[in-house]
Structure formats: C-alpha cells, structure tokens
Amino acid sequence: MIEQIFQKRPKRHIKDLNIVPILDMLTTVIFFLLMSTSFIEYTKLTVPPSQVSVSSSPVKDPPVTPKMLLAGSEANLKVLLTWGGRKAGEAIELINEPDPALRREALLKATQKLSQNFILAHPDEKTLQLALTSKLPYQDLISMMDGVRESLPDIVLISPAEAEARNRFSNGGPKK
C-alpha cells in the first residue's frame, strides 16, 4: 500500500513549444522599431523663420583675381598678367632668350617687375594664380614662382588648358 502511495505517476506527455521562431520575429520587430524611431527625428526638421537683412554696403567690389601665365616657345616667351575688378587690366612682358640659364634670369626679372607693378596698384591683394602652357618646361614655372614670391606670397597653380585658353583669348580671340 505504501508503495502505491509513493509510486510515481505516469507523466503526461506535453509537447514542447518551439520559441526560436518567436524570438526571431521579436528581434526583427525590435530592430525595425528602433530604426523607425531614429527616422522620425529626420522628419522633424525645424526651419527658422525667414528674416530680412539689410546690407550696409549695397555694391561690393568684384574680386581682382590676378592670373599670370607663360606662353610661347622656349626661345620666345610671353608673360601675361591679367586681373579683374573695377580696374581690370593686363600687362605683358616679352622674353627673347634661347639660352635656358639666361632665360631663367630674364623670366625672374620679368615676373618680379610685373608683380611689383601690380602690387603698387592693388596693395591688398596677396594671391596670384600661375600657369604655363603645356609645351614649356617645368623649370620656367619654378622661375615664375621665384620671381613672384616676394610680392604675392600666396601662389595657386592653374591648369595648362586654362593657360592656353587665356593665351588664345589675349591674342585676339579663339583660333580656328
């Protein structure tokens, strides 16, 4: 009798619940909920109200933007300095020197002269754009930079294509 009391009852067979798909679904839903809350912040764009501002100086002077380019052949060089602004203009120096050593000195003097004359007319200007056409040696560009450095310390190089286009324009328009 005691054995019957303490006898183990047969277990009921309960089917295990597979919770892996449920957890996968919850993970995905949580991910999308988190992402959608961050996108809501992007839709709340606050734009300040429009205002009217009054300018103290209605007309500002156009920029000067001086450009110096070197064009021609190795024996006959043309140094062209152009600038814009209210008093736009250009200055040209011609160098006829086939010897490279003498050409370097002549190029130094020509660029120094052009840049110093430009600085006398525009003392506030500190930047100059330099270029040479594609057929000229790189040493000529270095000579130009050396000649200009004292007057205009900020030097910006521009492409040979722009130098060739400016050279064509300064010779009386595009060549056909």
Image (cartoon, rainbow, N blue to C red):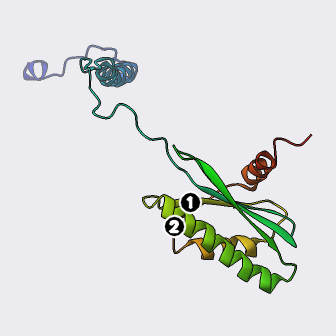
Examine the rendered structure and indicate whether residue 132 appears above or below residue 166: below
Q: First in sequence, mark 1 or 2: give its number.
A: 1
Element carrying mark 1:
strand
Q: Which amino acid does label 2 sit on?
A: Leu
Q: Residue at 58%, 55% (x, y): give it.
A: 66
Residue 51, image x, y percentages: 25, 20
Which of the 4 image quarters holds residue 149? bottom right
- Residue type at mark 1: give it: Leu
Residue at the bottom extreme of this rendering: 101
Name above or below for residue 49 compared with residue 112: above
Residue at 44% x, 41% y: name it. 61
Q: Where is residue 112 in the image (x, y as percent from the top left)?
A: 61, 73
Question: Pointer 1 and pointer 2: residues touching (CB < 8 Å)?
Answer: yes
Q: Is residue 132 visible?
A: yes
Q: Residues within 10 Å of mark 1 (few under 14, many from 20)?
A: many
Q: Where is residue 78 in the image (x, y as percent from the top left)?
A: 78, 64
Left or right, residue 121 beside residue 133: left
Please determine whether, in this image, residue 96 is positioned above or below residue 45.
below
In the rendered image, the quadrant that contains the C terminus is top right
Q: Nearer the viewer, residue 165 or 34?
A: 165
Name the residue tied to disc 1. Answer: 128
Q: Which labelled disc corresponds to residue 29? A: none
x then y, percent, for residue 105: 72, 82
Q: Distance between the residues labelled 1 and 2?
A: 6 Å
Q: In this view, does 80 lie to the left or right of 26?
A: right
**Disc 2 designates what residue?**
152
Residue at coordinates 84% horizontally, 41% vertically from top-left? Answer: 174
- Element under label 2? loop
Quadrant of res 103: bottom right
